Image: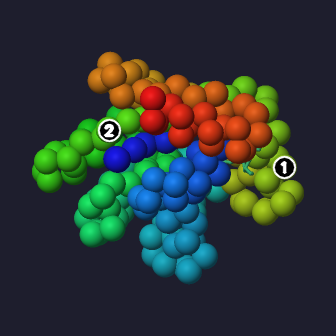
């Protein structure tokens, strides 16, 4: 299974991707997590990414695509993978297609988590209190949502035209949403 999970910031992508990937036995690949790991290790990639993340902007496609290409070439992705937070731009969609096509692979399904915008802002503000993530301030959250609706939301129509979208209601308790995703995948 080669899967993508999409949805606005705070939709529960990362939260759900961990459990769903484990249940399917495939690696969970979160571009946000990889960037944050690089930030905390102080690598050159982390220094570059942090400027964008702290402003609520996307890290440039050239950097993100190279990082994903490297990750998907590892052996653990042979049985499949769950991509979380990638692709987020049309260029990333095209690049992902090209990466997979060169090995005769393709995306099988795209899980789209739908949520209420007010609720996700509140989730992220709660996370700010619990984890202190530097991009969870009210101002940066607003910018992240704008960037999402401008650049990423339109991508769902690309995948919808290919018949790959599984729309899942992301409101409700975490285990309830997980159950919805797993049943959509097996349906
Ligand atoms: P991400 O790490 O992907 O951050 P995110 O969109 O906020 O989602 P995340 O997965 O962390 O949160 P979730 O919804 O699970 O990206 C961060 C930044 O990295 C981007 O802004 C960008 O700068 C950069 N980046 C990443 N990928 C990129 C790309 N491809 N191209 C360019 N730049 C890229 O959860 C949010 C909160 O809600 C959590 O606290 C969780 O506990 C809570 N929650 C989840 N489900 C819930 C539920 N059902 N009920 C109540 N609370 C819930």
> Quarter holding the C terminus?
top left
Residue 148 in the image, given as x and y percentages of width and height: 56, 34
User: Does residue 10 appear to the left or right of 43 in the view shown?
Assistant: right
Residue 133 in the image, given as x and y percentages of width and height: 73, 60
In percent of the image, x 58 and y 66: which residue is there? 36
Q: Do the residues labelled 1 and 2 touch (CB within 8 Å)?
A: no
In percent of the image, x 46 and y 36: which residue is there? 185
Of marks 1 and 2, which one's residue comes earlier in the chain? Answer: 2
Cα gap from disc 1 to disc 2, whole angstroms: 34 Å
Q: Is mark 1 within 8 Å of ligand 1?
A: yes
Above or below residue 45? Residue 16 is above
Which of the two residues, 62 or 125, is positioned nearer the viewer here? 125
Above or below residue 138? Residue 21 is below
Which of the two residues, 28 or 41, is positioned nearer the viewer here? 28
Circle 1 SS class: helix
Label of residue 126 in the image:
1
Q: Mark 2 points at which residue?
A: 108
Label 2 Cα neighbours within 10 Å, binned few <14 / some 14-19 / many ≥20: few
The answer to whether one can see residue 86 in this image is yes
Above or below residue 142? Residue 128 is below
């Amino acid at each position: 299974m080669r899967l993508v999970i999409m949805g606005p910031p705070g939709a529960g992508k990362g939260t759900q991707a961990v459990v769903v990937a484990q249940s399917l036995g495939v690696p969970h690949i979160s571009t946000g997590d990889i960037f944050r790991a690089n930030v905390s290790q102080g690598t050159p990639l982390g220094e570059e990414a942090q400027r964008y993340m702290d402003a609520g902007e996307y890290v440039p496609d050239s950097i993100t695509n190279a990082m994903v290409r490297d990750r998907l070439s590892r052996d653990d992705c042979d049985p499949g993978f769950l991509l979380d937070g990638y692709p987020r731009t049309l260029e990333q969609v095209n690049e992902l297609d090209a990466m997979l096509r060169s090995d005769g692979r393709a995306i099988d399904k795209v899980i789209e988590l739908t949520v209420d915008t007010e609720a996700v802002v509140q989730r992220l503000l709660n996370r700010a209190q619990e984890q202190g993530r530097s991009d969870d301030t009210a101002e940066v959250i607003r910018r992240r949502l704008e960037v999402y609706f401008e650049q990423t939301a339109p991508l769902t129509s690309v995948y919808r035209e290919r018949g790959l979208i599984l729309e899942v209601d992301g409101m409700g308790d975490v285990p309830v949403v997980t159950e919805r995703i797993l049943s959509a995948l097996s349906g």
